[in-house]
Image: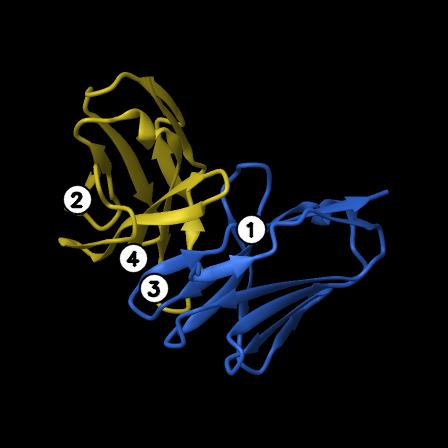
Chain colours: A yellow, B blue
Amino acid sequence: EAQVTQNPRYLITVTGKKLTVTCSQNMNHEYMSWYRQDPGLGLRQIYYSMNVEVTDKGDVPEGYKVSRKEKRNFPLILESPSPNQTSLYFCASSNGGTDTQYFGPGTRLTVL
Amino acid sequence: RKEVEQDPGPFNVPEGATVAFNCTYSNSASQSFFWYRQDCRKEPKLLMSVYSSGNEDGRFTAQLNRASQYISLLIRDSKLSDSATYLCVVDTGTYKYIFGTGTRLKVLA
């Protein structure tokens, strides 16, 4: 089954404790992206990657890191989480351009 | 001005009604346009891409007006299952996707 998976689905953590949210896709997509969704602000792009070892900043990259060492995986790293990073996070993948983006189920993160 | 703007709604309509949503975008260089559907904080799913010539998929029709920089979505014969949030998405042409904040639709029995 073609899918995008994210782990964990729910996470409660404390300020400053490094964490990684994993994202994996099995569709051989070149393009992957991370978004956060907050009430009243919609989905905002954090980082995206057009291929292995090629990443670029989206609209809200501050406080986040990403890496793309393999085509299927695109982890999101929060080196020192803060409460303003409490949000719902989605990973997505596609073949790029006009192709649809397929979204993972989301990770609900709470930073205390 | 937001890059992509939508009326947040909610639009409360009876079953069988026709409802239309509009979305405006500010970047005239935008390349691709989409409507996504999102149910109650679940992941967004593509409803349809929007082409310059307009396109239809069953009860759903999407239109693009590049001159006025807006896209629209028309839903005919609304069903209870159409209740969701509809997200307008614009690709600026550099793999950056800008999402509108969404329009909530409630179809009432």
Q: For numbered disc 4, what is the local secondary structure? A: strand
Which dot, 1 or 2, sits closer to the camera? 1
- What amino acid is labelled 2 in the image? Ser
Q: Which residue is mark 3?
A: A96
Q: CA distance from mark 4 to mark 1?
A: 24 Å
Q: Which chain is indicated by disc 3? A: A
A50 up-or-down from B33: above or below: above
Q: Which residue is mark 4?
A: A31
Q: Residue furthest front?
A: B1
Q: Are marks 3 and 4 in contact (CB under 8 Å)?
A: yes
Q: Are marks 1 and 2 in contact (CB under 8 Å)?
A: no
Q: Are marks 4 and 1 in contact (CB under 8 Å)?
A: no
> Whole-percent x and y of residue A69?
14, 46
Q: For numbered disc 3, what is the local secondary structure? A: loop
Residue drawn at x 61%, y 55% is B7
> Mark 3 or 4 closer to N-term?
4
Q: Are marks 1 and 2 on the same chain?
A: no
The dot on residue B102 is 1
